Image (tube, helix red, strand yellow):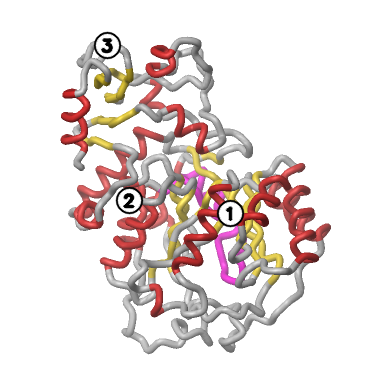
Amino acid sequence: MTIAAFSTQLRQAEPEVVVHQYVAAAASSSSSSSSQSSNTKSVSASSPERLPNDARERNAMYSNELTRSMSGIESTVRNDWSKEEIAEIFSLPFHELMYRSATVHRMYWNPAEVQQCTLLSIKTGGCTEDCSYCSQSTRHKTFVKPTPTMKVQAVLEAAARAKEAGSTRFCMGAAWREMGNKKGAFRHILEMVSGVNSMGLEVCCTLGMLNATQAKQLKEAGLTAYNHNLDTSPEHYPKVISTRSYEDRLETIANVRDAGISVCCGGILGLGEEESDRVGLLHVLATLPEHPESVPINALVSVKGTPLGDREEGDIDEVDAFDMARMIATARIVMPRTMVRLSAGRLSFSEAEQYLMFQAGANSIFNGDKLLTTDNPNIDEDTALFEKFGLHGKPAHQGPLVAPLEKEGKIFVTKVLAGAAVNSESAFA
């Protein structure tokens, strides 16, 4: 059902349900004693500058919001996107796509605030999977040599250095297919999670497949988010990986979500996919029961010794800045309240190209000179980049800043209000 049809249906249901249109003011996190004021609550000038840090709590504040519009662009948070709708957005002329995504970004976020994450490989190499892009698989002969799991203290020391360098989220990755029955290793990881959390950092892990019990234990230890990428579309996926099904990945994502952990889930460009596969990946993400808290968009960093790293020149088109910006922009439009992370491959793009990606809607990065086994810009370079672009980092354990245009009353919002008789029209202030 289209938004227009949904709006018409709601109006036909009056007076039980009405559509209320108003000029937005910043949203308040305070509760209201009356049903009507709870449904219509909006942010006053004296309200906090930041929204709740928990994505579910944040989204619940806007649960009765139907659309936002500004400068001729309308946006909505929805989970019923069709592939055709996403393909139409993805295929827009580049200048139009960039305008739309930048406008949507400013309707929901402060574009100057960017989350900074550091990723550490706590167990490198020796993975039994056959992912055709991965340097850590035992099936590929690469420069990566298997190493044992890092000691808890060494990980905590690395986290402390990351915090000192400005990171607010510390991510730990282990080259495993799944946690399985690795009880000793899992116990150490729970200690790592608890220790990093106690430093005031947000904590993320990527450990392969998890069952529901393991997800709950990680949540209890203080895990903020869990990364488990889908990589590509369901159709292209079997050409990239055969040792783990797409359904396996979706099951882990469901276990993480059900445990109350934020989901970090995205994909990789440059796996030999078609544009339809990029649309297909975004369609899966945008139609999950809840949009991921963050969606990392990676450009393949090919490694010699892997099937994709050993491809013949010209077999697969290289990923350029326009490919990345188009993917980021489309993700921003179809998942407007999701953080979109500019991830692996950033080192291959110029400062101007990275600026294009931030303008497309990226508001999170990995910093530090390594992403598991591949190179990444160092902290000093990113600090200089942020200063040049006028960006600043998002603090740990604090929600995002309220969008400045929301606080300034420049966004037109349509809300659905149950059991309240209110005016359905208002003009801009």
Viewer-nearest residue: 367 or 385: 367
Q: Quadrant of the N terminus?
A: top left
Q: Position of residue 137 (x, y in %)?
A: 59, 80
Q: Is residue 208 left or right of residue 275?
A: right
Q: Position of residue 120 (x, y in %)?
A: 66, 61
For image coordinates 31% across by 62% down, the residue present is 280
Earlier sequence position, callout 3 versus callout 2: 2
Q: Which residue is mark 2?
A: 329
307, above or below 341, in the image: below
- Disc 1 crowd rating (10 Å Cα; few below 14, some 14-19, many 20+) is many
Closest to the camera, between mark 2 and mark 1, is: 1
Q: Quadrant of residue 139?
A: bottom right
Q: Which residue is mark 3?
A: 422
Q: Position of residue 96 (x, y in %)?
A: 20, 48
| Disc 2 residue type (three-letter) | Ala
Q: Is residue 373 magenta?
A: yes
Earlier sequence position, callout 3 versus callout 1: 1
| Disc 1 residue type (three-letter) | Tyr
Q: Quadrant of residue 378?
A: bottom right
User: Is residue 21 in sight in this rendering?
Assistant: no
298, above or below 385, in the image: below
User: Is residue 267 in sight in this rendering?
Assistant: yes
Q: Quadrant of residue 337?
A: top left
For image coordinates 47% across by 72% down, the residue present is 245
Q: Position of residue 117 (x, y in %)?
A: 59, 51
Give the magenta range.
362-388
Q: Which residue is mark 1?
A: 226
- Disc 3 crowd rating (10 Å Cα; few below 14, some 14-19, many 20+) is some
Closest to the camera, between mark 3 and mark 1, is: 3
278, above or below 399, in the image: below
